[in-house]
Image: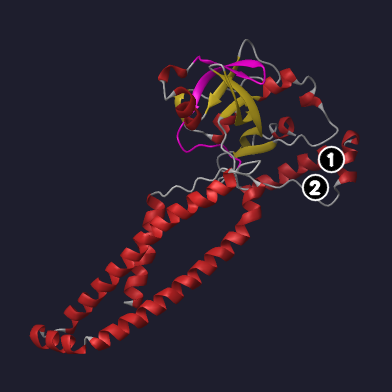
């Protein structure tokens, strides 16, 4: 399928493939399990992964390699195992008994395209083909590799759907692919394009709806909390009627009082938002600790960043103004 989709040069600027798995890696006389992937030779160029040090794969043959196979490591693996030593390039690792040489380090934040997995090692597909002769030519089952394509300039997803489905249907119609039609007649009716901007994983499909429900519940709780605080502020303002009357008499303006009360409510809201961020950091770390303790740990980047802080500040300001 990879080779056939690559023939659609007017539709795709490039088509790559990858397959995630765990590797047994030897670094400085130490063996450890590391999450990684096999990827085609054009993977980094198609994905446009930012390389912080060295280089990514070039479009070499996916069927064989000359000399020692290359490996691209993640920024996290570089930090943990090599202490960010820039001399890491040309260092060798032992992966599943094969000697590989480090040719590049991906930029911080790039963890691959499979949600819930942090890819620390990217090995060439040709290495798997070398270790498993005939792997690329097997026709008796799906191989579990994800295909990813970058649309050609000026080509939309709608325009690409027809030629992609045509190649897919032709593939299924051939005699040696009868198992696909027989085993899963309802699951594979047509070739589909799925947006890959946020990666591909069953993890996202599994948790998108529950998380949306959770966010709706959070919104309802926020509204209830704001209504309760607003009632408390109303009761407090009733007790401050004498103060309000004196301020009106002294300053002679309602707008100054409005600004004062809005300032008070905004400070209260921003204080609540700050406490919420602290609790969120603690709660996220606790939940992620549970996920990491599973037999197959799930990698989720839940670090507080500027976008999260800006969202929290925005919600706090809107809540403070609206209910203040």
Could you say which quadrant of the image residue 7 lies in? Answer: top right
The magenta stretch is 90-114
The residue furthest top is 67
Q: Which residue is mark 2?
A: 188
Q: Position of residue 248 (x, y in %)?
A: 14, 86
Q: How many marks?
A: 2
Task: Name the side, left or right, on which 41 lies relative to 239.
Answer: right
Q: Between residue 288 and residue 209, name the one nearer to us.
A: 288
Could you say which quadrant of the image residue 52 lies in? Answer: top left
Other residues around mark 2 within 10 Å, as few (<14) / some (14–19) / many (≥20):
some
Indicate whether 97 appears above or below 321: above
Q: Position of residue 76 (x, y in %)?
A: 48, 32
The residue furthest left is 250
Q: Residue at x 76, y 25 (%)?
A: 136
Other residues around mark 1 within 10 Å, as few (<14) / some (14–19) / many (≥20):
some
| Quadrant position of the C terminus in the picture | bottom left
Task: Name the side, left or right, on which 39 lies relative to 229.
Answer: right
Task: Name the side, left or right, on which 298 lies relative to 271.
Answer: right
Q: Residue at x 54, y 25 (%)?
A: 72
> Please, what secondary structure does the residue beneath circle 2 have?
loop
Q: Which residue is mark 1?
A: 172
Indicate whether 210 appears above or below 110: below
Question: Are the residues flagged by discs 2 and 1 in contact, CB closer than 8 Å?
Answer: yes
> Magenta stretch: residue 107 in it?
yes
| Quadrant position of the N terminus in the picture | top right
In this orientation, does residue 4 appear? Answer: yes
> Please, what secondary structure does the residue beneath circle 1 have?
helix
């Amino acid at each position: 399928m990879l080779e056939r989709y690559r023939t659609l040069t007017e539709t795709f600027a490039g088509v790559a493939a990858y397959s995630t798995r765990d590797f047994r890696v030897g670094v400085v006389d130490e063996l450890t399990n590391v999450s990684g992937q096999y990827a085609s030779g054009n993977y980094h160029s198609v994905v446009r992964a930012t390389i912080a040090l060295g280089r990514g794969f070039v479009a070499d043959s996916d069927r064989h390699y000359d000399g020692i196979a290359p490996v691209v490591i993640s920024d996290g693996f570089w930090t943990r195992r090599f202490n960010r030593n820039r001399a890491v390039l040309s260092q060798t690792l032992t992966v599943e008994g094969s000697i590989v040489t480090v040719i590049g380090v991906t930029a911080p934040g790039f963890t691959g395209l499979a949600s819930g997995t942090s890819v620390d090692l990217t090995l060439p597909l040709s290495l798997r083909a070398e270790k498993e002769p005939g792997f690329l030519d097997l026709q008796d089952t799906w191989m579990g590799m994800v295909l990813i394509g970058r649309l050609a300039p000026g080509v939309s997803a709608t325009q690409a759907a027809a030629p992609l489905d045509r190649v897919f249907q032709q593939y299924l119609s051939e005699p040696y692919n009868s198992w696909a039609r027989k085993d899963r007649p309802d699951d594979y009716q047509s070739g589909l394009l799925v947006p890959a901007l946020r990666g591909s994983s069953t993890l996202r499909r599994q948790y998108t709806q529950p998380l949306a429900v959770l966010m709706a519940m959070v919104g309802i709780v926020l509204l209830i909390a704001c209504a309760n605080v607003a009632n408390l502020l109303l009761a407090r303002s009733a007790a401050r009627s004498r103060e309000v009357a004196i301020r009106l008499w002294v300053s002679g303006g309602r707008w100054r009082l409005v600004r004062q009360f809005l300032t008070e409510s905004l400070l209260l809201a921003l204080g609540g938002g700050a406490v919420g961020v602290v609790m969120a950091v603690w709660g996220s770390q606790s939940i992620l600790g549970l996920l990491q303790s599973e037999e197959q740990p799930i990698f989720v980047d839940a670090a507080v960043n500027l976008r999260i802080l800006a969202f929290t500040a925005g919600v706090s300001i809107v809540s403070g103004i609206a209910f203040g």
